Image (spheres, rainbow, N blue to C red):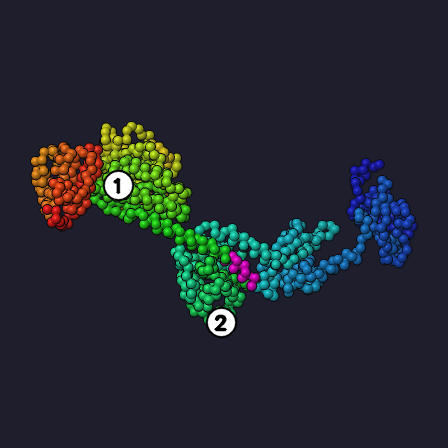
Amino acid sequence: MDPTLQVHEPDQPSGGVVVLLLDEDGTVLQCPSAAFGLTGRTASELRGRPFTELVPDPDRQPGRRGGPGEMQQLRTVLLHRDGTEVPVDAAMVPLPDGCPARHVVCLSPAPTDDKPRHPAKDRALLRAMFEQNHFGLVVHGTDLGIERGTLNSCLPGGFVTDRPPPGARLSDAVLDEDAAAIEEQLRRVLETGEPVIDWEQSARPRRNPGEERMLSMSVFRLHDGHGRALGVAAVYTDVTTEHAARRRLRLLQAAAERLGQNLDVTGNAEELAEILVPSFADLVSVDLSDSVFEGQETGAFVPGTRLRRIAVASADGRWPAEIDQLGDVVRAREQESFNLREGTSLRVEDLESWRDELDPDEERRRLLFPDGATSAMFVPLHARGAVLGVMGLWRRGERARFAEDDVSLIEEIASRAALSLENARRYTTELRTVEMLQRSLLPPAGVDLSAAETAGTYIPASTAAGMGGSWYDVIPLSSARVAFVIGDVVGHGLGATATMGRLRTAVQTLADLDMAPEELLTHLDDLVIRLGSTEPQPGNGGVLGTTCLYCVYDPVTGRCSMASAGHPPPLLTCPGGPTHYADLKPGPALGSGGMPFEPLDLHLTPGGVLAFYTNKLVVHGGRPAGAEESGGGREGAESGEDRERAESGGGRAGDAPEEPDGCGEQPLRPLVEGVATAVERGGSPAEIGRAALDQVLTEVPADDVALLVARVRALDEGSTAAWRFTDDPAVVSEARELVINQLTTWGLDQLTFTTELIVSELITNAIRYAGAPIGLRLIKDRTLICEVSDPSQTQPHLRRARLTDEGGRGLFLIAQLAHRWGSRYTHSGKTIWTEQPLNGVPEVPLDLF
């Protein structure tokens, strides 16, 4: 065998058509090279051979009868060179007399299923496809003009016959915008040959532009036997109903997923508008009543009900200037109010006709009629029997107008939205209730005392779940002293707020006993342990784990003493010095029990600033800016180097404590920078607090925070006078003389008589029951303060003496003469103090004598 033939011999017959020319005797005169695929022989080998060698079975040979041009067709078998039989379809056409060739024979591989071809059925199938009424079939030429097809089945006003008029194009039946999008896909298929399957595109009929129509299109390229493009064929199917159903499901799914994800009224309204634009409407507005924002119960929806436009959305991103804007107050008229009050939607299919019917004034025009809008719907936001507001929707231009089916869809979405808004309203009610309770339990924001000027700032959390528990307090104490308190309750919500109120009351009660900070925290710790053991600990407000810092400042001596139960140390800024952290070691949080609280004593110069903050303004595991390892004692101004630091203002530049035990949190650097900058500018405590919070908080915090800033003061020189006496009864008259002279110097002669009596009684009691040394101090502040100190720690008790008693009237006399009186323990004994107002002479009851 010729090796060349072996190389080119195919493994199976070719699929091409072979044409043979035969003479009168059936000898092959001409044949193409493609015959090799069917016979296994080259063209030169076939020429001159009888055709009967290729078709040996006489019964399967084409006949040679019939007039010129009469074609004979049959299924026969060719004998391949390798001996195999090749089924073929044969067609023989006789040629006119006088030609060298008398017959033309066309051979093509027969189908493998052994079913004969039926050209008539093929033609019938093609004709039926162009005549059916269930989908459109269009053949486009290379210029994308329509050569054959019909669109009437899926596009009213389209081509009815399969022979459109010359020059017909899609734009004759479809709006230009949609036709251009379809032709772009056709051109891509024509150029690349890659088919498009089930591609959906809007196809609004030109005869009815407002009608929504969606077509699904499958496109493939047509080409001849040489692969040259002849055009494209497209099958169009009307999927408008299916598209509308899918769009409805998508909108409902989006509403279910996005609405109600937060409990913010404005946020839910904005989500609602964004869901509907542009998939359902071109313009959407949401107007809500003021009661929804205020968290109040909504009243009846009557004409003139005040609404606020809280959310808008536009398909082109620009809200029309000719209608009410975001934030404007709008009011529904009587006709609109009736529909909305009944909970029914108002659909206006032809907005222009409605405008002519209403003849609107300027207010109604701005409410209902944006320029270019053709159709509108107004849907009430109705939840739990109340109308919260109204949603307005408009469609513009050539977009399909709102239909009856759209009403049920938008009412379902509006129902979901209204429920989300109602939940947000109720949450707003709870949030404001917690905030109002929290603020009512806090002291005034600013307090101006002789000892200090303070400014407290409370910032509620963004949610009710994060609110409650942070508190501060400023408590005036005896002898012109003042106490600063900052604390943080475990948990959030109403429970934490109530717990905070109870603890604040307990601190005020204990502070009235004039306890030292560490002693007060010990008593408070015992109280918390009792409360925690007798009451359940809800997750939203338990007492165990509460932190508290208590600080006492004396403007006479400049001494500041503080202790902490798990709370971070305050920031301290001295005049002309840096801002740093007080060298305070926090003890365990309240409720731990058994651990002492270490006090810190400092000496503060007038003008020094203390900044107390809650744990929400600190970060876990960090260290303060410029922190250094510090060691040694924590006695503050009591000895050695610490005394020098205290006398200079309370700390070295950049000095900071080690990380407190049990409190792995340190202030953020911006808090330090904010306080330092504001103090350097000479701002007030309120300005310092605002500057510090502006540095730390860039958004509404997730938890509530509190900040207390205090600028300490010292009493004026000459406003105090102090003496010491022995326990000799003769010193009583001496003390009276000293008091009279001092009051005369201060210009308080009107208080001489009562003060003499008070001093006499207190010193006499000290001599009789306590012994020396006895101290006497007068302080001229906003009141006249008289203090008598002795070494005894036995507290005096007020009682009413009987007529037969020889004594027991001293404290009763003092209680009648003084405006306030009390006693406190000291390191060396106790001090009994009284206060008298400076303006006026106190009335002395006659029955005292």
Q: Position of residue 16 (x, y in %)?
A: 78, 48
Q: Which residue is mark 2?
A: 357
**Residue nearest the observer in this picture, 506 or 197:** 506
**Could you tell me which secondary element the residue under label 2 belongs to?**
helix
Q: Which residues are magenta?
A: 403-414
Q: Earlier in the sequence, mark 2 or mark 1?
A: 2
Q: Is residue 288 left or right of residue 561?
A: right
34 in the magenta segment: no
Q: Position of residue 236 (x, y in %)?
A: 66, 57
Image: 173 above or below 255: below
Q: Nearer the viewer, mark 2 or mark 1?
A: 1
Residue type indicated by callout 1: Ala
Q: Which residue is mark 1?
A: 511
**Could you tell me which secondary element the residue under label 1 belongs to?**
helix
- Work out which quarter of the rendered image holds the N terminus and state it: top right
Q: Position of residue 332 (x, y in %)?
A: 43, 65
Q: What residue is shown at x 36% (from left), y 46% (from top)? A: 497
